[in-house]
Image (cartoon, helix red, strand yellow):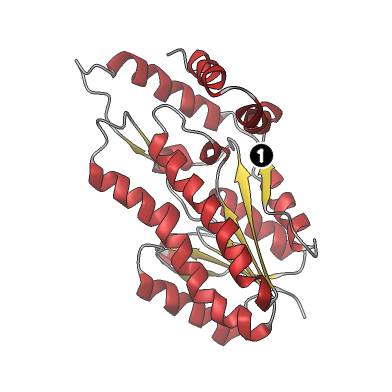
Amino acid sequence: MSKVVIITGGSSGIGKSIGEFLQDKGYTVYGTSRNPEKVQNSKIPLVALDVRDSESIYKAIGEVIAKSGRIDVLINNAGVGITGPIEEIPTDEMRNNFETNFFGPIEVMKAVLPQMRSQKSGLIINITSIAGYMGLPYRGIYSASKGALELVTEALRMETKQFGIEITNIAPGDFATNIAAGRYHAPVIKGSAYEKVYGNTLAEMNTHVDSGSNPIEMAQAVYVIINTPKPKIHYKVGAFMQKFSVILKRTLPDKVYEKMLMNHYKL
């Protein structure tokens, strides 16, 4: 019997690539989308789910269980970007980012855990970000939401190990997806103290995404993890320097690392 996989945010970008790859490998895959009826030519079945809406989460999970009888793998992929000087990002936009990138994935995990516990098995993969390992200028809120999910995963792994459930993180670097189009960009305010530097940084960030790695690399990494009996706590997927930046963060003195980042962002 093929494993049943559900992927939040499965209609585009990394989630879509993972879903199609796993389906081709013989898995029973369900993707989710806030508006599946608007998605054309999806190769995997899509279930309506909004990670900011608990009712839609539990309804979607119930639908998958009713159709397939079990959930073997949850891939928490749905997320949104946010950029801007922290001083100028509206607080409501910060809260919205955490609702999608942090509280949403937790609510989805809470919805699948009873089923996995009854099966005495299950795997949860949280898609975080290499940005979650460091406070990046003009991406501080995004870094914070993804870093928070990394830490929650560490805690939840220990709480659920007794039930035969495995939980892990995959932190991608920059991938060529449509995430930049869906990001909340704080506007570059004319006359702002941050106008010039933030404007330049924003343009550079979008260039990095456009020239990022192929999302198929994430799909391949997920496939390997699903077939690993005891997954590691953290995985990182992306360009060498992006992954190496995490090692540098751990080894360099704080101010040296900060200076390196500021030079990179031309601050």
Which residue lies at the image location 79% right of the left edge and 62% below the top edge? 227
At a point 43% along the width and 72% down the height, the residue shown is 57
The answer to whether residue 198 is left or right of residue 223 is: left
Looking at the rendered structure, the secondary structure element under dot 1 is loop
Above or below residue 112? Residue 206 is above
Q: Who's the residue at 40% across and 35% down the image? A: 140
Q: Is residue 146 visible?
A: yes
Q: Quadrant of the C terminus?
A: top left
Q: Is residue 70 above or below residue 106?
A: below
| Residue 10 horizontal side relative to residue 247, left or right | left
Which of 122/22 is in front? Answer: 122
Q: Position of residue 126 (x, y in %)?
A: 58, 56
Q: Which residue is mark 1?
A: 214
The residue furthest left is: 191
- Most distant residue in the front direction: 253
In the picture shown, does residue 38 fall above or below 131?
A: below
Instruction: Kindly identify the amino acid type of the residue bearing the numbered disc 1.
Output: Asn
In percent of width and height, residue 201 lies at 42, 21
Locate the N terminus by quadrant.
bottom right
Mark 1, Cα crowd under 10 Å, few <14 / some 14-19 / many 20+, is some
Percent position of residue 212, x then y: 60, 32
Q: Is residue 81 visible?
A: no
Q: How many numbered marks have been drawn onto this rendered protein structure? A: 1
In the drawing, does residue 20 fall left or right of residue 208?
right
Q: Residue sitting at 50 percent across and 53 percent down?
A: 149
Q: Is 78 in front, or is 234?
A: 234
Q: Position of residue 179 (x, y in %)?
A: 47, 42
